Amino acid sequence: MKTCLALVALGVGVRLALALGTDVYFDETYYWQWARHLAWGYFDHPPMVAWLIAALGIRGTSLLCGLGTGVAVWGLALDVYRSRDAAWRALALWSAVPVGILSGVWATPDSPMLLFWALGLWALYREKWVLAGLTCGLALLSKYPSVLLGLAFMVAALKARRLPAGAWLTAGLGLLCFLPVVLWNASHDWVGFKFQLNHGLGGRGGWATFGEYVAGQFAMGGPVLFPLALVYAVRGPREQFLLRMAAVIPLLFFGYAAAKTRGEANWPAAAYVAACIGVAGMRPVWQRAAAWSGMAVVLAVTSHLLFPVLTFERDTVLARTHGWGVLERLRTPEQLFPGMAPGPTAVYAPTYQLASQVAYTAGVETDTVGPSRRKSQYDLWPELELKPGQDVLWCSENGAAPPEELVQRFGSVEGPVKLTGVFRGRRLHTFTVWRLTR
């Protein structure tokens, strides 16, 4: 028990250290932009993360969702094993899952999805059909792959040759919660559904991308917990068949997707909710190996993010979480370009990530433009309204000049001015800023 409490406390400490010691990064600022334009759907995901950020703020959303997920894991494990010791073991394991730690620090759709997935799985296990419908519906409002929890339940029902009448109530309530997202997509040419299908299954993959996916699971799920999740899915107790399916179906589905396109390691994050509960019932040696190996990964990444010692040619993780504060200088463009009218102005950027980061950090209105940009929510919002004769800025990273379509709208171009983002003496970002004048 003392070891479990130590792991739980360590997990909480890591979350707080990362929340306080890293910058808000571009995925979070993108969802923060959504929160400024509340709707029933967005280009990339359903709306839950935006609603929560609007109510709780960025860090409040991730930390509270992380706390709630841990409580749900503890409660479900208590019901499964009828043992507080087993419940604490499951929570200790969840406190050491790298992807669980990250979703409890940075506000992404995974944060609410994991919370409502865990609550939905708990309600389905206890056959609390109304609660299951509401929580599964909220999971669907968080992230589209939450539908896999329903698939796991259907597989379990087929295995048991039993479909309780209350399950229809669950399905009805879940779909009712999700209906506004469907209607929003219908009114926007099904853009959210199309994007996710193309993003998850529409690229080019093969053994290389599948290998990247497997390697990602060893990192994000844990070097021992990931293989134990597969063992649990195949050889776990019969009475835990629903949990076993909730662990293996996301891993299999996104493994298949990874063979089609280059995926992301966090995609099957929900699998590890049930995996932690399953491994909590295995031999103590496996529990300890899974927990401490996962925590070793967490501590290694955390120490690098807060006190980097090693140097990598391309340190993506460090660059994502530090060095963005220099963009605050775009709030006072007259200091960058003498003669420019004082006060905030509009800023254009080549990507939705940088546009969102500028909007959050500098407190200015932004938009995306250029041939290299990926379509995003910015394409669904109206274009920026500029005052007659208003100057604007173009901000890019790694030296990209303003695109021709933007240059043609203005009479002259001045720049660039370089802004460098650093962390503990390391150069992480080099932004180039141009002034465009009518």
Image (cartoon, rainbow, N blue to C red):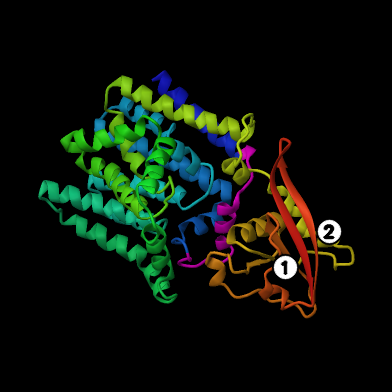
Confirm whether residue 123 shows in the render.
Answer: yes
Label number found at residue 91: none
Compare marks 2 and 1 and give the one earlier in the sequence: 2
What distance separates the C-alpha of mark 2 from that of mark 1? 14 Å
Residue picked out by circle 2: 336
Q: Nearer the viewer, residue 212 or 131?
A: 212
Crowding at mark 2 (Cα within 10 Å: few <14, some 14-19, many 20+) = some
> In the image, what residue type sits under mark 2?
Leu
Q: In the image, is 172 to the left or to the right of 297? A: left
User: Residue placed at 22% from the left, 43% from the top?
Assistant: 242
Q: Tell me residue 67's x, y (percent).
A: 46, 40
Vertical order, 348 against 125 (above or below): below
User: Residue placed at 53% from the left, 29% from the top?
Assistant: 300
* Quadrant where the image shows the N terminus: top left
Q: Nearer the viewer, residue 7 or 391?
A: 391
Q: Write down the region rendered in magenta.
A: 20-43
Label number found at residue 346: 1
User: Residue placed at 40% from the left, 35% from the top?
Assistant: 218
Between marks 2 and 1 in the image, the one whose residue lies nearer the viewer:
2
